[in-house]
Structure formats: structure tokens, C-alpha cells
Amino acid sequence: MRRYRRRDWSLIIVIVIGVLLATLGWQWLRFRADLRVLPPNVSVAGMDASGMAVEQVLAALDGAYAQPVQLSYQGQPVILAPEAVAFQFDREATRAALEAVRTGRNNLSGFLAYLLRRPSPRVEVAPAVRYSSERLDAFLSRVAQQYDRPPQEPVPLPEALTFRAGRAGYELDREASRQLVEAALKSAVNRQVELAVRTSEAPPLQMRHLEEMLKALLAGFDGVPSIFVKDLQTGEELEINPDVAYAGMSVLKIAVMMETYRALDEPPDPEQTRLLTETMTLSGNFTANLLLRDIIGGGDAYQGVENLTASMRHLGLINTFMAAPYDETAPPPAIVTPANSRTDLNANPDPYMQTTAREVGLMLEMIYQCSRGGGALMVAYPGAFTPEECQQMLDIMSQDHTDSMIEAGLPPGTKFARKHGWIGDTHADAAIVFSPGGDFILVVYLYRPQWLEWDVSNPLVQRIATATYNYFNPK
């Protein structure tokens, strides 16, 4: 009985050992079969080569390296053929590297790792390639020469009365791009490159671009123009012939209105408000003379013009004066100013009353700043003006509607405060424009010897107003 049991166990052990040896043999055969291909977790030039034969990998690399590299410069496609940089794929050197990886596990430790199903370590095989660095640099230089673009200034478009916005500049980052292209040349799967490009900001629209625009609009005008523009947010000014002496005309009634408010101790009563409104909106000479006589001059119109002129001097407006009330015909006293002493430009200024585009613009600025609680009026005449009074002046000027000149050049519904005026040889308009892109002052004077046709001046001033509005409100 004992012998039978021993014989039985011996048989079992033999069977078990036989099974184990058979299993090991089978696993060994499978292990040897796996050695014919690359192990898992092997990549070559970015391509997953797990389980591939060496010849398969080499064939795939041959196909990949025959393809061009697709480059992009800010959306512009650029093709780089491998032969352009003398690219060469060394198959034999690459084969040797792959064989080393394939056979490197052909040992006992490799077999044990196979039996225990240990995960294979990640291996990146670098293919053996060569190319000309000099040719690659030359290629990138050609790309930069073709596609690099310096920043472009905004461009005035006089026909459209608008501005083409400035454009950003682009410059190829050659060193960074070189590294990207080299990586793509060596890659079997990623043959596309977005080149590294440095971007510089687009130059902003500046007042000098508006000046270029306005000079283009004035190019065909055969007279003496004068323009004053002021950005009431930044204080920046644009001036074209700003200190030429012109006839004051009805535009000088802005000064009459300012002096009326300065002379009054209380806000204007209804009758005084009527006189101010008719003076500023209907260009009433008679009502302007009443203000000069009864309020500014204390009963004497000539004293009123003297007071007004003295006040302009006090405000620093040395080229602005009145020598007589409106519609006077008696010879006025000669008043000499820097503006009317010029010999280079002559706009035949009225000897009775004169000003310049700049000084009219500064008057408007004084009223505007005063309405906001500051500015030269309050500094020069402490306690004489309140913000409410200056706002009343703006409100009165906002009623000056003629559907012409500056007003007609603004988009419908635009708020403005203005005063226009014209005589036979001189036409002018002066306005504060309240726009979404910022408040600004625009003063335009046009003079032509003997006679200035309305059909010439009116559309020209409209175009100037439109261009200026579009500068502050670019589309």
C-alpha cells in the first residue's frame, strides 16, 4: 500500500515537472518569436514602433522623410523640401540602433521579464539623419525676406474721409523657428510647423495722420485756409496756419457772449437770454450791439468793444479784438497784432474786428472747461463765471442749426455747440463736438480774394468736419 502511494506521488511530480518544462518551452519559443520585432513602448522619430519589424520601421521612415515639411508663417503656407537642405537618412546607422533595441532583451533577465509580464521601459530611438545647417539658415532667411513686414502706419483715405488702421508688424524669430524646423525634419509623424514669429503692435492713429488728411483735402483750395483742432481729453492740438488774422464776423460773437456773462452779476433774465440766443443762433448784429452797449459797456457800445478787447488781452488772446460795434462805417482806429502784422499770409482781415482760428478755438476750450468747473476763465476771472453759466453758453450755441458746414459734416444726432459766420471773401465755422470717441474742437476759416463761392466753402468744411469726426471715432 505504501509503495503504491509513493509511486503515485512520483508520477504526479513527473507530470507537473513535465507540464512546467513544456510551458517554459512554449514560453521560450514565444519569447524567441517576439525577439524578431521591436518590444512595446519603442518609438522612432515620434512614430510608435511597438511590435514592428526593423525593416517595417525603416520603410516607414523612408516614406516619411521623402515628404516635404509643411511650414506656416502667420497663415501663409511655405513648403520645405528635404533636398533643399541636403537632408539624408542613414538607414544602416538607424538599422543598427533598432537592432540593438530589438536584441537587447535576448538574455535571461529579458526572458524573466517576459514571463513575469513586466512592462517594457520606454525607449526613443533617434534616427540617424544629416542636413545642411547653412542651407537651412539660408532658407529661413529667404522666408523672412519674403514674409517679414514692418509695422504700417495708419493711412488717411481722403476720398472716403476715413483712415485705414495701422497694421501690426511681423518678424521671423529665426533661432526659435530653426529649432522647430529641425524637429520636424527629424520627425516621421509631425511634419508641420507654425513658424515662430515676433509681432509688434500696430501703430496707433495720431493727430499727424489727421493733419495729413486735412492738408490733402485743402490741396485744391486756392485761398488761405486756417484750421484748429483740439482733443479735449488729451489736450493735443492740430494747427494749419493757426495765427493768420481773419475777419471776426459773427464768429466773434462767442467773445460777446463770454463778456456778457462776465459782466452780469446774476444769471441772465429772460430778455437778456433772448438777446444772447438771437445773437448766437440768428447771428443778430443788432442784438450783439445791444449786449455790447447795455451790458458789457454800461450804456456805451464803444466802451463795450474796448472792454471786450481788454478782456481778450487778459485771457492771452492777443490777436482778437473789436475796434467798433457791428455794422459801424466810421473809420476804426488801427489795431496792430502779431497776426495782422504777418507778411507771408494775408486773409484781408476786417479792420473793425479780427481773430484767428487758434484763438477762437481757445475761447471754445475756455467755455468747455469752465462748464466742468475749471479752465482759464475761472483762473483769470475768479468768481465771475460758474459752471452752470458756462453750460448755459454751450446750450445756447447748440441751437445754432444751419444744416451746413461743420454741422452737415457730422453724423445725424451728433451733439455740438457752434458759431458760424461769413462775408464775401471769408467763411468760417467753429464748434465743440461731443462724440462717442471723445469731445473735440474744430475751427475752420477759409479766405479767397474778392469772393469765396458757397459751393466751394460749404462742401469743403463739411468734408473737413467728417474727416475730423472719423479721426476721433474710427470705424
Image (cartoon, grey):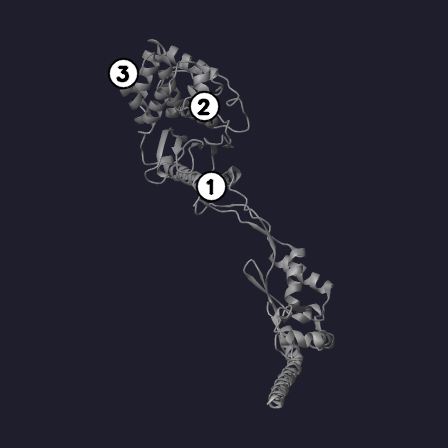
Residue 217 image label:
1
What is the crowding at mark 1: few (fewer than 14 residues within 10 Å), some, or many (at least 20)?
some
Residue 229, visible in the rendered structure: no
Q: In the rendered structure, which amino acid carries the disc numbered 3?
A: Asp
Label 2: which residue? 355
Q: What element carries label 2?
A: strand
Please say if 213 is above or below 270: below
Q: Badge 3 is on which residue?
A: 269
Q: Alpha-carbon neighbours of circle 3 within 10 Å: few (<14), some, or many (≥20)?
A: few
Callout in the foreground (3, 2): 3
- Does 311 sit above or below residue 441? above
Q: Residue furthest left?
A: 270
Residue 439 in picture, x, y percent from top left: 42, 33
Q: Left or right: 444 with respect to 176?
A: left
For the residues labelled 1 and 3, the Cα–Cα distance comes to 44 Å
Contact (Cβ within 8 Å) of mark 3 with mark 2: no
Q: Tell me the element at label 1.
A: helix
Amino acid type at circle 2 is Thr
| Residue 377 image offset from top left, x and y in percent | 43, 18
Residue 142 placed where, x, y %? 66, 60
